[in-house]
Each structure stands twice: as structure tokens, then as C-alpha cells.
Image: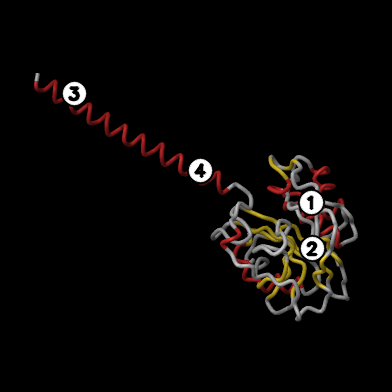
């Protein structure tokens, strides 16, 4: 009889241990899944954590640079490069007061997920190809396959480019600045590695349009509104390169 009771007690203890292990496993799994889901939310970043450091003008840059524009749908600035290969880019926004900000795109809205095609429209505008983000949204709905971005730029719009680089050489300060010296832009994708940053907590496309050759680069950010911590403007390149996932060099002059 005592032996039977002993067996029952052991079974109860084993059951209790298994219950605790199962509970801990479920809690850990829920926590991991929650963190993964949160990391997938594009650009879900609290800008108040970062100071406004962008510069609208740069005395070391000889081009016209940023100009304020009023009463336009989806943009409030343009950027014009130096005289030799002079181009004017319309700095479209995916969000804010743009008429397309709440339009459906990539299982969400343009404001949430439209950075890639908005950057594409910024680049196209500099090459006298007038496509708004809404034009591109309709063309590529429900989403552009960004693995095909290089091919689209070259074969559809006639803009030669390198395709995306992932190696440390092409993502280095030196290579990026040397390319921007030629007044040819670079499409970049930043991500949340090694850490979250002022640009994103997931991943985000932007355009680099110019350099002053003194470690400052002009960032055209499709979700940077007026006077916040990630507005379009001049930034030290070290605000960008630590978070680069890939970069596409525009080769067309």
C-alpha cells in the first residue's frame, strides 16, 4: 500500500514538473512570436527618441540643393544637383498629406509599406520620367517584387544601374561618397541591424542624392516629414552606413 502511494506521489510530481515546463515553453513562444511580429512592422519607430540633426542647406555643396515647394500633392521639397550633371528630383512622400498615403499596398497602406516605390518615383523624377508614387502603386499593385527593381529601372525606364550590392566594399563610406561625387544617386535599404535606428525598426528604402565630399550626404527619405528626426536633408554618412542592408548604384548620367 505504501509503495502504491509512493508511486502516486511520484506521478503527481512528474505531472507538476511537466505542467511547469509546458507553461514556460508557451510563455517563451508567445514572447518570441510577439517580438518577431513587432519587428516586421515597417518603420514603427518613436522619432522622439532621436534629435533633429538634418541640415536643409550645405555651404560646402555647389548645387542648388533643397528648395521648398508649396501646394503640391505628395511633396514639399525638390533637390537639384550640381551644374555638370544637373538633375532636379521631386522628393515624394509615401505618407503625410499625399493623396495616396492611405491607398492599399503590400497588405497595408502606402504610408506603412510604400517606401520602395516612392523612392523609385523620386529617382525617376530626376531623369525626367514623371511617375508619382500613385502611378507606380497602380502599376505594381499589390506589390513590386524588389528583386526586380534593377531590371525595371533599366528595361522599362531606361536607367542603367548596378543592381543591389550587399558586400562591405560597396556599402562603405568611401565607395558611396565616390559615386555620389558624380551626381548619380544611390537607392539604399536600411534595416534594424545591428540595432533599431532613427530610420527604421524593420527595413526601409531611401535615396542618397548628393555629397559635399566632406562626409555629408543628402538623404531623400520617403517617410520623412517636415522637421522631424528623419526628415530629408543633409546627414553625416555615419548616420546611414552602419545600418545598410544593400545599395543600388544608378549608373546613368
Q: Position of residue 116 (x, y in %)?
A: 73, 52
Which residue reaches farthest front? Answer: 71
Q: What is the C-alpha distance between the residues marked 4 and 1?
A: 31 Å
Q: Which sits earlier in the primary sequence, circle 4 or circle 1?
A: 4
Disc 2 crowd rating (10 Å Cα; few below 14, some 14-19, many 20+) is: many
**Relative to residue 131, is residue 3 drawn left or right?**
left
Rendered image: mark on residue 34: 4
Dot 2: element:
strand
Dot 4: element:
helix
Residue, disc 2: 250
Q: Which sits earlier in the primary sequence, circle 3 or circle 2?
A: 3
Residue, disc 3: 8
- In the rendered structure, are the residues bearing label 4 and label 1 in contact, judged by CB atoms less than 8 Å apart? no
- Looking at the image, residue 112 lies above or below residue 200: above
Disc 3 crowd rating (10 Å Cα; few below 14, some 14-19, many 20+) is: few
Q: Position of residue 33 (x, y in %)?
A: 50, 41
**Relative to residue 70, is residue 222 drawn left or right?**
left
Residue, disc 1: 98
Q: How is the image coloured?
A: secondary structure
Q: What is the C-alpha distance between the residues marked 1 and 3?
A: 70 Å
Q: What is the C-alpha distance between the residues marked 3 and 2?
A: 74 Å
Which residue reaches farthest left? Answer: 2
Disc 1 crowd rating (10 Å Cα; few below 14, some 14-19, many 20+) is: some
Q: Where's the N terminus, which quadrant? A: top left
Amino acid at each position: 500500500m505504501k509503495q502504491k502511494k509512493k508511486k502516486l506521489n511520484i506521478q503527481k510530481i512528474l505531472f507538476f514538473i511537466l505542467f511547469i515546463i509546458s507553461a514556460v515553453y508557451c510563455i517563451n513562444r508567445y514572447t518570441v512570436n510577439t517580438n518577431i511580429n513587432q519587428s516586421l512592422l515597417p518603420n514603427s519607430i518613436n522619432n522622439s527618441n532621436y534629435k533633429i540633426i538634418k541640415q536643409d542647406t550645405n555651404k560646402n555643396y555647389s548645387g542648388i540643393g533643397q528648395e521648398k515647394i508649396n501646394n503640391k500633392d505628395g511633396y514639399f521639397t525638390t533637390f537639384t544637383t550640381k551644374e555638370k550633371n544637373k538633375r532636379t528630383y521631386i522628393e515624394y512622400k509615401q505618407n503625410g498629406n499625399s493623396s495616396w498615403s492611405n491607398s492599399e499596398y503590400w497588405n497595408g497602406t502606402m504610408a506603412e509599406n510604400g517606401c520602395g516605390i516612392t523612392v523609385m518615383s523620386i529617382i525617376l523624377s530626376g531623369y525626367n520620367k514623371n511617375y508619382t508614387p500613385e502611378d507606380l502603386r497602380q502599376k505594381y499593385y499589390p506589390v513590386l517584387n524588389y528583386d526586380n527593381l534593377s531590371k525595371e529601372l533599366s528595361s522599362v525606364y531606361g536607367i542603367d544601374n548596378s543592381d543591389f550590392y550587399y558586400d562591405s566594399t560597396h556599402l562603405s563610406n568611401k565607395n558611396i561618397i565616390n559615386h555620389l561625387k558624380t551626381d548619380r544617386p544611390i537607392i539604399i535599404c536600411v534595416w534594424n541591424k545591428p540595432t533599431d535606428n532613427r530610420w527604421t525598426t524593420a527595413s526601409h528604402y531611401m535615396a542618397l542624392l548628393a555629397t559635399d565630399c566632406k562626409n555629408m550626404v543628402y538623404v531623400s527619405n520617403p517617410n520623412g516629414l517636415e522637421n522631424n528626426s528623419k526628415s530629408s536633408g543633409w546627414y553625416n554618412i555615419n548616420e546611414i552606413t552602419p545600418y545598410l542592408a544593400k545599395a543600388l548604384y544608378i549608373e546613368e548620367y
